[in-house]
């Protein structure tokens, strides 16, 4: 049996250790209620860390999948196919920001004869976008991708099946062949591959650009686009190197 004095001492010790915890918790609560901006700052810090972690992961994916991004033989190419700088765009024909940046891309191409453009169909805005993406990839088989792409980006209103086929006809495409090629599983496979690649690089919206080792999300202006192109060229990353191990 424990000594009564020892029991009293232990009971007092328990009170001493519990009381500060309760008091501390109350003090923290009172402080946060009086200074709610601390919670906001903590949330902002947490979000910044999350974004930094995601960006680091996206850069790792870019480094590991260079050829998927820049050299996929199924991805249509515009500009100078042999240019020394490659700009990759992920886009959706129903994205208003993609349409907004389309003239900027035309200006960038016109200003830089060494610019190579890789187009990544990334239809995320509904069935009309998917139909248009398939039509564009089918148009590539008729050697008319870039012309059709620019016409689609210049369209007004919601892109659907009817508008897509109308633009294809105006572009001089063989519509029956186009419809047949759209059914090829390889077309859907190309789109699925683009979606998977975009998600791996934490690209969740359109437009998005990859220039050198930079991933730019959202519409941009000509100055920013030109700066990134020049940076890629001066950094020696104008055409991304082959992934490690591929050249061995």
Image (cartoon, rainbow, N blue to C red):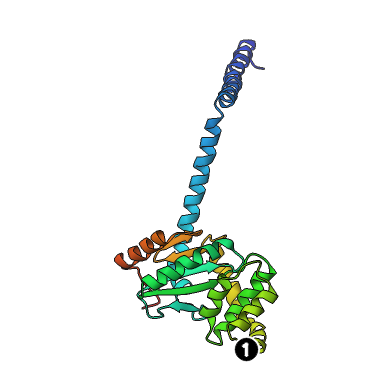
User: Alpha-carbon neighbours of circle 1 within 10 Å: few (<14), some, or many (≥20)?
Assistant: few
x and y percent of residue 31 in the render?
55, 23
Picture residue at 40% right of the left edge, 64% below the top: 213
Q: Quadrant of residue 156?
A: bottom right
Say if residue 243 shows up in the picture. no
Identify residue for label 1.
Answer: 174
Say if residue 135 shows up in the picture. yes
Q: Which of 245 and 46 is in front in this view?
A: 46
x and y percent of residue 163 in the render?
66, 74
Picture residue at 65% right of the left edge, 86% below the top: 175
x and y percent of residue 222 in the render?
41, 62
Q: What element carries label 1?
A: loop
Q: How many labels does the image show?
A: 1
x and y percent of residue 118 in the render?
47, 74
Picture residue at 56% right of the left edge, 25% below the top: 28
Which part of the image, by quadrant, shows the C terminus? bottom left
Q: Nearer the viewer, residue 55 or 142?
A: 142
* Horizontal side, residue 189 vs residue 235: left or right: right
Q: Quadrant of residue 243?
A: bottom left
Q: Which residue lies furthest to the top in this view?
A: 5
* Horizontal side, residue 222 vs residue 54: left or right: left
Which part of the image, by quadrant, shows the N terminus? top right
Taking 89 as reference, is 204 above or below it? above
Q: Nearer the viewer, residue 230 or 36?
A: 230
């Amino acid at each position: 049996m424990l000594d009564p004095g020892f029991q009293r001492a232990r009971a007092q010790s328990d009170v001493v250790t519990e009381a500060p915890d309760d008091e501390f918790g109350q003090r923290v609560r009172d402080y946060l209620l009086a200074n709610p901006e601390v919670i906001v700052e903590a949330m902002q810090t947490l979000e910044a860390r999350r974004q930094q972690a995601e960006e680091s992961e996206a850069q790792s994916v870019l480094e590991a999948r260079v050829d998927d991004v820049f050299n996929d033989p199924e991805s249509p190419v515009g500009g100078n196919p042999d240019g020394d700088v490659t700009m990759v765009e992920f886009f959706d024909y129903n994205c208003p920001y993609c349409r907004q940046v389309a003239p900027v891309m035309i200006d960038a191409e016109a200003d830089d004869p060494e610019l190579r453009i890789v187009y990544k169909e990334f239809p995320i805005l509904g069935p009309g976008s998917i139909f248009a993406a398939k039509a564009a990839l089918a148009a590539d088989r008729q050697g008319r991708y870039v012309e059709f792409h620019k016409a689609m980006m210049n369209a007004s209103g919601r892109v659907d099946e009817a508008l897509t086929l109308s633009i294809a006809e105006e572009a001089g495409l063989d519509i029956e062949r186009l419809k047949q090629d759209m059914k090829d599983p390889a077309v859907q496979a190309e789109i699925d591959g683009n979606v998977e690649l975009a998600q791996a690089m934490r690209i969740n919206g359109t437009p998005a650009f990859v220039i050198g080792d930079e991933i730019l999300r959202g519409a941009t202006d000509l100055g920013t686009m030109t700066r990134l192109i020049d940076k890629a060229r001066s950094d020696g990353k104008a055409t991304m190197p082959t992934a490690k191990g591929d050249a061995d």
